[in-house]
Amino acid sequence: MSSATSAPSPDDHFTFGLWTVGNPGRDPFGVETRAPLDPVDTVHRLADLGAYGVSLHDDDLVPFGSVAAERDRIVARFEGALKATGMKVPMTTVNLFTQPVFKEGAFTANDPQIRRFALKKAADAIDLGVELGASVFVLWGGREGCEVDAAKPIAAALDRLAEAVDLLCDYAIEQGYDLRIALEPKPNEPRGDILLPTVGHALAFISELEHPEMVGLNPEFAHETMSGLAFNHGVAQALWQGKLFHIDLNAQRAGKFDQDYRFGSEGVRDAFYLVKLLEDTGWDGMRHFDSHAYRTEDADGVWEFAAASMRTYLILREKARRFHADPDITAAMEEAQVAGLREPTTPEGGLRAIRAADYDLAALGAQGYGMERLDALVDELLLGVR
Ligand code: GLT
Ligand code: MN
Ligand code: MN
């Protein structure tokens, strides 16, 4: 495993979407500022930088509308690069948002023909993912939402979304695929409002599915932050419910458009608590970056961005290690009674004993927790003076 000062290695489980380093710098007001990347070159470049693998949408690899022979040729060439480098494809997904046919939705489009086409494309994408060795299939419902509430009864849309996920689970089971589905919440953009806007909405939705055990989450740092929520709390709950199947790392300022900045470039404290959570709980999945280089960057800037994403993670991982080794932090945590939260509340005798006991409310209300000191010590750690 790499240290903060060494280069990343595949053991660190860093992965990048083909669409992330491949982002051409287009935005709603401006055209591309960078040339497209060849996925085969991307695999080689990321392998050289120490990544574990790549993820992809169906269309990132096989251009939309390719005929079967072309698809097979592209996939075979890509598999050659994976073999040559040892890079893996742990996750794939399906693009149900770029083409005009999906402008009103995909699995939740009002037109049943569009919903059926979306399912056909998703099933094909599942086949592609399994062929490449993926065990997680992400569904990000970028177009599953609306601007005109009069035109989208939300309960019916959720029925259709559940129907689609159920069908895809049935398909994976029938095929004998070792595959789990990870839903990715996002509050808005590109739709005015998107279904399953937060981790909490998505977790609740899963309990209504036919195969809830096969479906979990792919939460994204930027997306929870857009809603002003604490990403690490959402991830902690997903872990607590056994539902963290994958994760998208990037950076974001609350209240802005989906920035998808380089991990750690905004909200370094939030990034630290997230890394600490993943490391403390022994998350053995991918550290997947879903972010892109600034539009200002040329190709060199893109590879700088990729290297820095991994380096920042490793630095924060080292900070998490130092957090636990720091005696002042340990003492401050004791003062804050952190360990007390791990004790069950219920004493012998249960609620009856709880109700019969006396509580010194004056003393309990007067006690201090020393959390200012603890918080400042974390600042010192992150600012590099400890
Ligand atoms: C798109 C989106 C991401 C999703 C990707 C998966 S595509 O770039 O902004 O958050 O993770 O479909
Ligand atoms: Mn994402
Ligand atoms: Mn995003």
Image: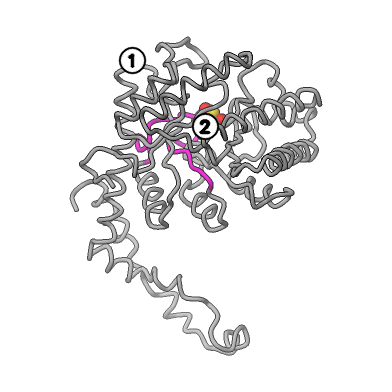
Residue 172: quadrant of the picture: top right
Q: Is residue 250 rendered to the left or right of residue 191?
A: left
* Residue annotated with mark 2: 132
Q: Nearer the viewer, residue 148 or 207?
A: 207
Residue 263 part of the magenta-drawn span: yes
Give the numbered dot on residue 298: 1
N-term mark: 2 or 1: 2
Mark 2: which secondary structure? loop
Report the residue at 56% width, 16% height from top. Answer: 63
The local crowd at label 1, few if under 14, some if 14 to 19, many if 20 or more residues have their Cα within 10 Å, is some
The residue under label 2 is which amino acid type?
Answer: Leu
Indicate the position of residue 127 as horizontal and vertical percent values: 62, 31
The residue under label 1 is which amino acid type?
Answer: Asp
- Alpha carbon of mark 2 to alpha carbon of mark 1: how far? 30 Å
Indicate the position of residue 364 as horizontal and vertical percent values: 44, 77
Highlighted range, magenta: 245-267
Report the residue at 24% width, 44% height from top. Answer: 4
Report the residue at 50% width, 13% height from top. Answer: 29
Report the residue at 35% width, 28% height from top. Answer: 46
Residue 62 part of the magenta-drawn span: no
Q: Is residue 150 above or below residue 204?
A: above
Question: From this viewpoint, which residue is outermost toward the left?
Answer: 385
